[in-house]
Image (cartoon, grey):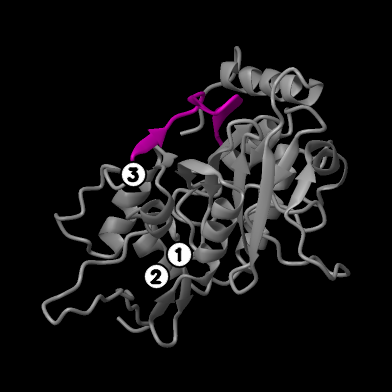
């Protein structure tokens, strides 16, 4: 559930002050490097403190060929090569939410680079929902135990001298987080580029009204706050993929949620638009893997791993 901010939003206030300190030069400004995976339209980010070189990896991608059922590691290996080239120490591997459009490479990266794997505490709700859908059985604990840390709204950590604040931003899913690290906010699927709009809110546990409020919360950060987006799909008329914007650009020009957009109008638009969208191409394998922290299903008696596809029929 979205936290109550009727009286005061202490987590947001801390994040706002943190951004101001970073922008003023009184606190370190983190270095961010993005890696775009075109097959899944997903951006992975490595963010680090320029002094200590302590780093976090956010929203990694495992290569998956659905036709052959083959997994590979080219996207993750590019991240590893960069981390080693820059002599970074990875202390966190972060997920903004349980992705439905790509498989996470978090366990592979953790094995190569170390670091603690984290997601929002809302993962427990997601595991409960999809554990039933995929008939995961009693061996699947549904407690978030696959992760080293379950963050809640307002939690904090540091990358060397760079402060980080967690904002819970549900709506796309119940478990969505934004990581505000220095003056950079990693907002997952809540927002796309201003010319493309906002995330869908029709997955189980999603809510268009919550999404609007979460986005407005993010857009209460200082205007120069850098926003790093998990996806881009090239809006009509744009020829390049872009995954960085800022609060000012979103407030002025986001086609779904710019300043002056009424909550009820957004909810009506979002629900109508979501009814026209197809399910993500990799939703079935992605959720089964990602709700387990990126771990593949255990091999069966014949030594082979399997992913399930629930079947429906249009006949009774």
In the rendering, at what x and y percent does residue 125 appear? 35, 44
The image quadrant where one finds the C terminus is bottom left
Pointer 2 residue: 285
Cα distance between the residues tagged 2 and 3: 19 Å
Residue 80 shows up from this direction = yes
Q: Is residue 293 above or below residue 219?
A: below
Q: Main secondary structure of the magenta part?
A: strand
In the rendering, at what x and y percent does residue 254 appear? 81, 48
Do the residues bearing badges 1 and 2 touch, measured as CB atoms within 8 Å?
A: yes
**Disc number for residue 103:** 1
Name which quarter of the figure residue 24 lies in: top right
Which residues make up the magenta segment? 147-169
Which residue appears farthest toward the top when viewing the image?
7
Which residue appears farthest toward the bottom when viewing the image?
68
Q: Is 268 on the left-hand or right-hand side of 281?
A: right
Q: Residues within 10 Å of mark 1 (few under 14, many from 20)?
A: many
As helix, strand or loop, the secondary structure at mark 1 comes to loop
In the rendering, at what x and y percent does residue 47 appear? 61, 43
Q: Earlier in the sequence, mark 2 or mark 3?
A: 3
Q: Is residue 298 above or below residue 56?
A: below
Q: Nearer the viewer, residue 291 or 30?
A: 30
Q: Nearer the viewer, mark 2 or mark 3?
A: 3
Q: Is 309 on the left-hand or right-hand side of 191?
A: left
Pointer 3 residue: 147
As helix, strand or loop, the secondary structure at mark 2 comes to helix
Q: Is 313 on the left-hand or right-hand side of 17?
A: left
């Amino acid at each position: 559930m979205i936290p109550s901010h009727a009286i005061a939003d202490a987590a947001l206030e801390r994040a706002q002050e943190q951004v101001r300190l970073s922008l003023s030069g009184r606190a370190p400004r983190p270095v961010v490097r993005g890696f775009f995976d075109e097959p899944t339209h997903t951006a992975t980010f490595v963010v680090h403190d320029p002094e200590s070189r302590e780093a976090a990896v956010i929203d990694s991608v495992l290569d998956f060929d659905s036709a052959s059922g083959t997994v590979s590691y080219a996207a993750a290996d590019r991240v590893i090569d960069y981390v080693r080239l820059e002599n970074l120490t990875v202390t966190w591997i972060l997920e903004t939410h349980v992705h439905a459009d790509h498989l996470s490479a978090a366990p592979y990266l953790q094995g190569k680079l170390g670091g603690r794997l984290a997601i929002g505490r809302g993962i427990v709700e997601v595991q409960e929902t999809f554990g039933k859908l995929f008939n995961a059985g009693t061996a699947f604990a549904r407690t978030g135990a696959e992760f080293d840390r379950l963050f809640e709204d307002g939690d904090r950590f540091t990358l060397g001298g760079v402060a980080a604040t967690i904002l819970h931003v549900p709506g796309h899913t119940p478990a969505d987080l934004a990581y505000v690290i220095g003056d950079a906010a990693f907002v997952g699927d809540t927002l796309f580029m201003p010319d493309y709009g906002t995330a869908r809110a029709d997955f189980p546990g999603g809510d268009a009204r919550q999404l609007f409020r979460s986005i407005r919360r993010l857009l209460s950060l200082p205007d120069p706050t850098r926003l790093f987006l998990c996806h881009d799909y090239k809006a009509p008329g744009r020829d390049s993929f872009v995954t960085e914007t800022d609060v000012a650009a979103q407030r002025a020009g986001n086609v779904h949620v710019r300043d002056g957009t009424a909550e009820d109008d957004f909810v009506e638009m979002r629900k109508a638009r979501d009814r026209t969208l197809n399910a993500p191409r990799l939703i079935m394998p992605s959720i089964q893997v990602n709700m387990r922290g990126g771990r593949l299903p255990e091999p069966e008696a014949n030594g082979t791993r399997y992913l399930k596809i629930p079947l429906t029929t249009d006949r009774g």
